[in-house]
Image (spheres, rainbow, N blue to C red):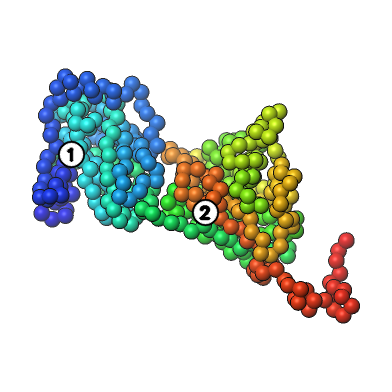
Amino acid sequence: MTPKAVRLLVGCCCLSAALACVEQDQDKPNAKDLAAAKVNLLSAPPSPRYPVNADLDGKVTFLGLDADPLPAEAGKDLRLTQYFKVKASLGDGWKTFTHVEGPGKQNYVNADHVPVDGKYPVSAWKPGDIIRDIHTVRIPDGWSFPVLEVYVGLWRGQDRMPIKSGPHDGEGRVLAASIPIRAANAAVARRRYVARLATKPPKIDGKLDDAAWAAAPSTGPFVNTLTGAAASVQTEAKLLWDKKNLYLAFDNADDDVWTDLTKRDDKLWTEEADEVMIDADGNGRTYIELQVAPNGNIFDTYLPSVRRYEDSIDPKLKPFSWNSKLVAKTQVNGTLNKRDDRDKGWTAELALPLEDVKGMDATSAVRLPPQPGDVWRINMYRMDQPKGKPQQAAGWSPPMVGDFHALSRFGELVFADADGNTTPPGPAKLAAAKPAGGKSGRREKK
């Protein structure tokens, strides 16, 4: 049998011992089966992690899918929870299928099964049913792809039920989810960025057209926060510094730029935003968090420990009540908040006074201004939410867990001089730079 024929025969499960194919058991469920299945017949549509809402021939809507754990891991089980809504009678002979594979249809795995642990086959589905189907897939050892694609649908004989709308592969398969996956024992190096001293500070207008930015190196594309693989959200950043400020520039590709949050310290992370967290003294406890939305709105807070806010210092304070002197400007390449057109992206430019990295910690040991060779711990993120799709995220130094506040995974921000040197000048260099008499040849401005 050719590989193509194997794909068409979607209802077959290959037995590892004999490489034979068997069809799903589609016997009519008995009363005991139906009673056991009722717990998975929902009274209202769910809110899955991966919403899809694909229309299969006007008869069934594939609502979406949940997956646990995230990220998935090679060689371990992945629990998939699929949701179907029945809109019309299907007729006899239809069965569900589930395929998992890597990008480009590589490492195909057939995960066919009878829904609801075999107790509620398609032959029993009734119009109005909302069905929750939970099953487990073992991801092969040695999986080498950063994602696992899940395809679902219905089949009968040599036919698949047509897909009228929703994401699909053109072969009668709904693309249910692209799940991040981590190879077993995978290690992702912590990121490191060398920030140059700006001899002329950039103008904070959101345009990123200053000579200082042109000369600054890019972080490179932000990555998937769970796996460290390439991210669907395209963002890069640059950093500079001088004796007054730390400067950050974000360049975001985005075809739907929007936000409806206009008050300072609104929860910008729930929509679209660029974010930076700074643990300047590297103590792994105290840090600040800053965010800017496409409209230039700011969120800032001081955290005395992980995910604890100002009210944990003083109950009279409210969370997010600490305000930095951050200056942030943005530019939108498109039309902000016009959801039915296609934008190109947006940029953000930030100037953070160095003193603000201490937050509310008057005892912070961080040296200000920093010197070449000094290292701060920092991380940067981007949140994006296209119209009709779930929120997406990317990060500079991937936390590898579902929590952006993983301080142990923050990257290193290394301070350099204007030429990119990170070694502080020694006494010999300082002496050589001075004329006879020990005075500097450069007049200091008062």
The correct choice, above or below, for 127 with respect to 160 in the image is above
Which of the marked residues, 2 or 1, is nearer the chain's N terminus? 1
Q: Is residue 140 visible?
A: yes
Q: Which quadrant is the N terminus positioned in? A: bottom left
Which residue lies at the image location 61% right of the left edge and 41% below the top edge? Answer: 305
Return the mark for residue 339.
Answer: none
Residue 263 in the image, given as x and y percentages of width and height: 65, 34
The reply to whether residue 253 is visible in this rendering is no
**Residue 172: x, y in percent?**
23, 43
Spatial CA distance of label 2 from label 1 is: 43 Å
**Dot 1 surroundings within 10 Å: few (below 14), some, or many (20 or more)?**
many
- Image location (x, y in percent) of residue 255: 49, 47
Q: Is residue 217 left or right of residue 61?
A: right
Q: Quadrant of the C terminus?
A: bottom right
Residue flagged by tag 1: what amino acid is it?
A: Trp
366 vs 238, left or right, is right
User: Which dot marks residue 155?
Assistant: 1
Amino acid of disc 2: Ser
Q: Crowding at label 2, few (<14), some or many (≥20) Cα neighbours within 10 Å?
A: many
- Among the 4 quarters of the image, the one containing residue 150: top left
**SS of the residue under disc 1:** strand
Q: Nearer the viewer, residue 438 or 445?
A: 438
Res. 152 image quadrant: top left
Q: Residue at x 67, y 47 (%)?
A: 328
Indicate the position of residue 178 as horizontal and vertical percent values.
36, 46
Residue occupying the point 47% across, 41% down: 391
> Mark 2 sits on what residue?
397
